[in-house]
Amino acid sequence: MPLATTASIVASAHGGACAFNIITLEHAEAVVVAAGREGIPVILQISENAVRFRLGRPHPLAAAARALAEAAPVPVALHLDHVTGDALLYEAAEAGFGSVMYDASRDPYETNLTRTEAAARWAHENGLWLEAELGEVGGKDGAHAPGARTDPAEAAAFVAATGVDALAVAVGSSHAMTSRSARLDHDLIAALRAALPASVPLVLHGSSGVPDDELRRAVAAGIKKINIGTALNVAFTGTLRDSFAAESSGADPRARLEAAREAMATETAHLLRVVSGRD
Ligand code: G3H
Ligand code: ZN
């Protein structure tokens, strides 16, 4: 089926919609296989960081992800995540992405607003759905800062002034956590949901560190798009580590990568069930 849009997957999700960060082809395959097995639509996202790892070009991995998405038995969308520079934003549509997260959250409020408003205007003129962030979710540089919070009144003003399609909010999660121990501020999620237009979904970043039950409560309180990256890497790297510990000889990587891909698919399927309310 043709590539789906992030907007349609988020709008039609039962419960919440999962957006998984992919770095390698195996990540993309694992997510698409799991979504097909579960019969649940999914968003594949590639971050600016991952683009840097892929030799600075978004096109090759995006093209592979798109080919997998078009062959999938469920709707799959392609999203460009955590874009901090305008040059990459301007490449998004041509590289095949239907949506972008523009991240000026490290800037002071007024700068974030000005940059995001310009990014949203450009995105809309070029057929892209734009997510922004207000109230920095910590952990992007390895330093966990779960203390930051998004203010509901400020969020309402920010959304009205910028015209963004979705808003990532700081409610207690933190990027790159390898243990699932984050506690979210569910009252704040409800207050943010009440403060923003119903047409603007709330996005949770750093969801790998959030336990299953906290994810279920977050969706019930109003989070709609759930971003997950590190949990896949934990499954992938853990399986490779076990494989090398059990057998360190041999040159062909395929058996190890196959096991690591399957571990990511198992983790992806579990999270899809939790976030969609099936488990
Ligand atoms: O935008 C990406 C996500 O926020 C992923 O965060 O790697 O901590 O799950 P995570
Ligand atoms: Zn994020």
Image: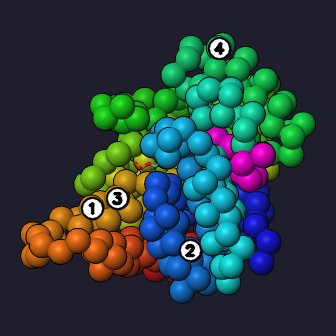
Residue 255 location (% of width, % of height) = 30, 80
Tell me the amino acid under the disc marked 2. Answer: Val
- The stretch of residues the image draws in magenta is 93-101
Query: According to the image, label 3 marks what residue?
Result: 233
Q: Main secondary structure of the magenta part?
A: loop
Query: According to the image, label 4 marks what residue?
Result: 111
Above or below 230: residue 141: above
Left or right side of 94 for 210: left
Say the numbered circle drawn on residue 32: 2
Say what secondary structure mark 4 lies in: helix
| Residue 117 figure quarter | top right
Marks 1,3: beta carbons within 8 A? yes
Q: Residue furthest front?
A: 251
Residue 94 among those drawn in magenta? yes
Query: According to the image, label 1 marks what residue?
Result: 237
First along the sequence among labels 2 and 1: 2
Say what secondary structure mark 2 lies in: helix
Residue 186 location (% of width, % of height) = 48, 49
Residue 127 location (% of width, % of height) = 86, 46
